[in-house]
Image: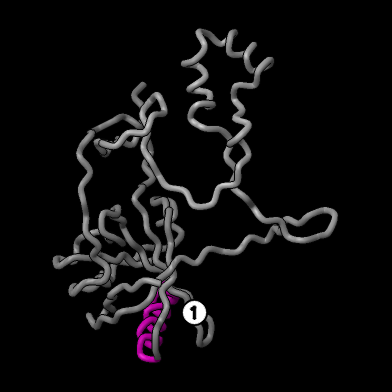
Amino acid sequence: MRYINLSNEKKRNAQVLFKSAPSSSKILMVNVNDKKPLKNKRLLKFSSKNSLHALLHQFKNSEQLSSALIKDDPEIDLELTGKFLEDTDKIYINDKEEVVYQIYKSEEVFLPDGTLKEERTPRYLEENIDQTNPVHWTGKLYPKNKIYQKLVFNKKYQLFHINGLTYDFLFDMAQKLSNEDSLMMLTAGKDSKQPLVLNDGGKPYRAFLEGRVQEKTYCLVLHLTDMELKSVIKEK
C-alpha cells in the first residue's frame, strides 16, 4: 500500500492509504473433467530468430516464405517454443529485433483529430502526492452525469483510513461528495494548481474524488485521467 497526504475543505490534512481495487471476475474457468480451476501460464511463442519479421528478412519474398512454412516449419524452435516463462525483463529492440543498449525517448503530442502536434524530450516529473504540501481539496464539483461525457478515466484507486481519526476525516469527505452526487477535482503542488504525479518519473494526471456512503461505511475513489473527450469538426 502507498500513502497520500490529503487535505479537506478546512485545510486540515492527513496521511491516508490508497491502492488499486480491481473488481473480481464473475467468470470462473474450470477443467471440464475434474472441475478444478484453471491456472494461466505464460508460454514462449517464438524467439527473435523465428518471428515473422525475422523470417521476412530471411526469405526473398512471401512465396518462398510460404513454401518454407509448409515444408520446414522455420517459425518453430524445437528447444524454445512452448517453454514456460516465469520472471521476465523488459528490453528494447530495433526494427531488426536486435537488442539495443542506448535509446532516445521522445514524447509525442497529438491534436484532437490525431495530427501530430509536437515531438519532445519527455519531462521527468517527481512524485507530489505525499510531500509537505498536501493534495488540495479544491471545492470544484462536477456532476457525475456530465463529467463522464467529457473525460476518459483510465485509472482509479481507493482511499483507506489507518485509524479512528482518519476514518472520521475520510467519512466526512465521502458524505459531502455523496450528497452532492458529484466528483471533486484534486490538485497538488505548492501553488495547488499542479496535476497529480503518483511516482517519480510518472505521468501527470488530473484527479477527481468520488464519495459513496452507506450507513457507517464509506468508499472514496480517486479517479485519474489524462484524456479529454473533444468533438472533431471537419471542414466541408
Picture layout, residue 59 above or below residue 143: above
Q: Residue furthest right?
A: 33
* Relative horizontal placement of residue 202, taking residue 45 as reference (left or right): left
In the rendered image, residue 29, in percent from the top left (x then y), is placed at 72, 55
* Relative horizontal placement of residue 79, taking residue 130 as reference (left or right): right
Total marks in image: 1
Residue drawn at the location 36% of the way across and 47% of the way down: 228
The stretch in magenta equals: 164-182
Picture layout, residue 166 above or below residue 59: below
Q: Main secondary structure of the magenta part?
A: helix
Quarter of the image where the C terminus is located? top left
Q: Residue furthest front?
A: 79
* Relative horizontal placement of residue 54, taking residue 75 as reference (left or right): left
In the rendered image, residue 117, in percent from the top left (x then y), is placed at 25, 32
* Relative horizontal placement of residue 3, taking residue 30 as reference (left or right): left
Residue drawn at the location 42% of the way across and 54% of the way down: 153
In the rendered image, residue 220, in percent from the top left (x then y), is placed at 43, 73
Residue drawn at the location 85% of the way across and 55% of the way down: 33
Magenta stretch contains residue 166: yes
In-front residue for pair 180/206: 206
Q: Secondary structure at mark 1?
A: strand
| Disc 1 residue type (three-letter) | Val
Residue 39 sits in which quadrant? Answer: bottom right
Q: Mark 1 highlights which residue?
A: 213
Q: Residue furthest bottom?
A: 164
Magenta stretch contains residue 233: no
In-front residue for pair 54/228: 54
Residue 202 sits in which quadrant? Answer: bottom left
